[in-house]
Image: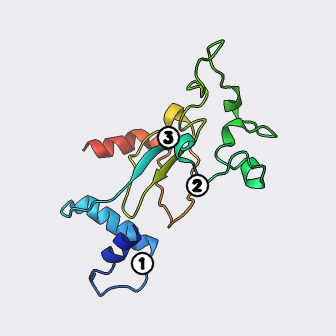
Amino acid sequence: ATSFKQKWYSKPKQGGAKAEVDVLDIEADFWRIIEENNQHVEVLYGADLYTSETGSGFPKGDGTAYATSSWNLNNIPLCGGDYPSLLRHVRCPMEKCPYPICPHVNIPGVMVPWMYVGMLFSSFCWHVEDHMFYSVNYCHWGEAKTWYSVPAHAADAFEDCFKR
């Protein structure tokens, strides 16, 4: 990803090459690529990586402050305290669950964090979160991400814009 960015921004640009590339330059290039649709750009992106299998940047069960923090994405669904999570009440509907890791309780992306890996110009489809939940994201490493949000009252107008 780093070499891709270095190669991309080493190309001469209108008005000469810049020494520093900022987030606004990257955002402008992203939308230009989308809108002009005359340039093939291939990027790598990994979505919905199940952290129970791949691991995450958040420790589990080692007793450290990070492992027990309520901001650790592994802990958010089970938080108690002054603002307890409603997800603490998710239970398996079976009296005796036959699964070693219950799929009714360990819901990927809800009770167990998913991990996403991206690079320059990678994107993820605009969507409403599963079950209309809010989303919590953490950038462990790398450069800034740009997020776009559409308020619920503007959802229909936003979708109409893309239907045209």
Report the amino acid beneath label 2: Tyr
Q: Residue at x 59, y 31 (%)?
A: 106
152 or 69, which lies in front? 69
Relative to residue 64, is residue 133 depicted above or below? above
Picture layout, residue 77 above or below residue 150 = above
Q: Is residue 21 above or below residue 116?
A: below
Give the labeled residue for mark 1: 21
Question: Quadrant of residue 163 in the image?
Answer: top left
Q: Which residue lies under the disc numbered 2?
A: 138
Nearest-to-viewer mark from 2 and 3: 2
Q: Residue at x 32, y 41 (%)?
A: 160
Q: Which residue is mark 3?
A: 152
Q: Amino acid at mark 3?
A: Ala
Instruction: Give the camera-side residue of 58 and 30.
Output: 58
Q: Camera-side residue: 95 or 109?
A: 95
- Residue 23 at x, y = what percent? 45, 71
Q: CA distance from mark 2 to mark 3?
A: 23 Å
Label 2: few (<14), some or many (≥20) within 10 Å? Answer: few
